[in-house]
Image (spheres, helix red, strand yellow):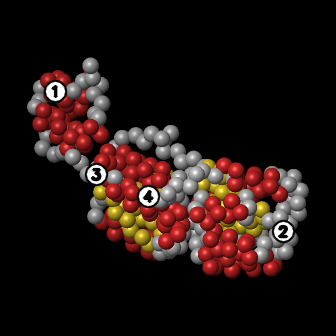
């Protein structure tokens, strides 16, 4: 049988209340008594079931999600998934709130992190902008004992506890490998459309993409990145200008948002035989896949990411290990031929249509 708190109390010669104080790191226990209890715990091999203990106490985990505002269908879908998790929160014992900040604005993000940390929540999940001041804000939060995970876009230079998202270098390499196969020996440069190179996930995708493209036998020019700031109108304008400047354009890799503008530009006028790879399956990319305007979409499950962030933050708050295999976010590849069935009320599609 597994040892219990009763066994610890009997072995150490103390009361159950004293054992409880030691297990929960509360004051009011003399050093010599604490040492006796800790020795009994080690001798008996007692392993505390933190989840069961917190359930018995009715512990609630206040969690804060910080996400960028703006016209980014993936982020709006992510926000919708957070709201779903919030409605499920009584079962998860999580009390979830959302802070939105202007996209790609480090100072606004710093203010949001500092504001959230001041309330001492059980954890913060943040879509990070790669800037020193943001890393410093994350470190300040952790110094006060608040666990922090980065979500979708990482900030490894900070002291964040965990990153919840896909391997973005691998995603970029996948896109590069697909683009190389799609183009074969066809000549012409390839354009890259991003939201902003201030976010690490876009930079990592570009790194993987260029590395994979360089491994193909056909030497190909990768044009300077078009930064659309997640604005469909700006993305459409930039892509149209690229078509004018490069009538021999062979491919486009859209590694962020702005796909609505991209699809509009392609529909109006695109070089013959243009191959296009984008991220995130939304109503616009789904329709473009069906119409043959986009060749492949790399997708990450926003719902899985939100649920993973909640599990990780609760584990960090409890001081227990994270189950790495459970928190690995996969990269899905969708072509016209393997599109999943459309689901009525799909969160991300609904949010995008409302926009």
**Residue denoted by label 4:** 81
In this rendering, would 335 be left or right of 308? right
Q: What residue is shown at x 53% (from left), y 63% (from top)?
A: 349
Q: Nearer the viewer, residue 236 or 129?
A: 236
Q: Please indicate, yes or no, whether residue 59 appears anywhere in the rendered image.
A: yes
Viewer can see residue 277 = no
Number of residues whose C-alpha sits closer than 10 Å to that of mark 1, classed few (under 14), some (14–19) or many (20 or more): few
Q: Earlier in the sequence, mark 4 or mark 2?
A: 4
Q: Secondary structure at mark 3?
A: helix
**Mark 1 falls on what kind of element?**
helix
Residue of label 1: 6
Estimate the spatial distance between the alpha carbons at disc 3 and disc 2, rounded to whole Å: 54 Å
Q: Residue furthest front?
A: 344
* Residue in the foreground of this view, choosing between 199 and 242: 242
Q: Position of residue 101 (x, y in %)?
A: 44, 72
Q: Nearer the viewer, mark 2 or mark 1?
A: 2
| Label 3 – label 4 distance at C-alpha | 16 Å
The residue carrying mark 3 is: 90
**Residue 336: image location, x then y, percent:** 70, 54
Q: Is residue 56 left or right of residue 303?
A: left
Residue at point 30%, 48% (across, down): 91
The residue pinned by badge 2 equals: 272
- Residue 207 placement: quadrant: bottom right
Mark in the foreground, 1 or 3:
3
The image quarter containing residue 205 is bottom right
Residue appearing at x 65%, y 74% in the figure: 261
Which disc is residue 289 wearing?
A: none
């Amino acid at each position: 049988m597994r040892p219990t708190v009763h066994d610890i109390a009997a072995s150490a010669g103390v009361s159950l209340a004293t054992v409880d104080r030691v297990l929960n790191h509360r004051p009011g226990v003399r050093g010599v008594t604490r040492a006796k209890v800790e020795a009994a715990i080690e001798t008996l091999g007692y392993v505390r079931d933190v989840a069961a203990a917190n359930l018995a106490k009715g512990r609630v985990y206040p969690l804060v999600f910080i996400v960028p505002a703006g016209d980014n269908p993936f982020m709006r879908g992510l926000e919708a998934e957070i709201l779903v998790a919030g409605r499920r929160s009584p079962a998860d014992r999580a009390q979830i709130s959302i802070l939105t900040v202007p996209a790609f604005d480090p100072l606004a993000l710093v203010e949001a992190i500092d504001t959230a940390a001041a309330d001492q929540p059980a954890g913060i999940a943040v879509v990070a902008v790669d800037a020193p001041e943001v890393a410093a804000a994350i470190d300040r939060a952790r110094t006060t004992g608040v666990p922090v995970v980065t979500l979708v876009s990482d900030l490894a230079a900070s002291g964040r506890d965990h990153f919840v998202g896909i391997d973005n270098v691998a995603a970029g390499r996948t896109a590069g490998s697909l683009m190389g196969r799609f183009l074969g020996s066809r000549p012409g440069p390839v354009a890259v459309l991003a939201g902003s190179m201030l976010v690490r996930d876009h930079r990592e995708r570009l790194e993987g993409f260029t590395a994979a493209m360089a491994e193909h036998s056909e030497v190909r020019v990768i044009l300077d990145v078009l930064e659309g700031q997640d604005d469909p109108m700006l993305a459409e304008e930039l892509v149209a200008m690229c078509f004018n400047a490069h009538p021999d354009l062979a491919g486009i890799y859209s590694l962020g948002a702005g796909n609505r503008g991209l699809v509009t530009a392609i529909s109006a006028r695109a070089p013959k035989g243009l191959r296009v790879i984008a991220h995130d399956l939304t109503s616009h990319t789904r329709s473009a896949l069906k119409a043959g305007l986009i060749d492949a979409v790399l997708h990450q499950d926003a719902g899985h990411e939100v649920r993973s962030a909640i599990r990780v933050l609760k584990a960090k708050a409890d001081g227990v290990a994270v189950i790495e295999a459970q928190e690995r976010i996969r990269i899905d590849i969708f072509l016209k031929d393997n599109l999943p069935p459309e689901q009525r009320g799909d969160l991300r599609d609904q949010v995008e249509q409302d926009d």
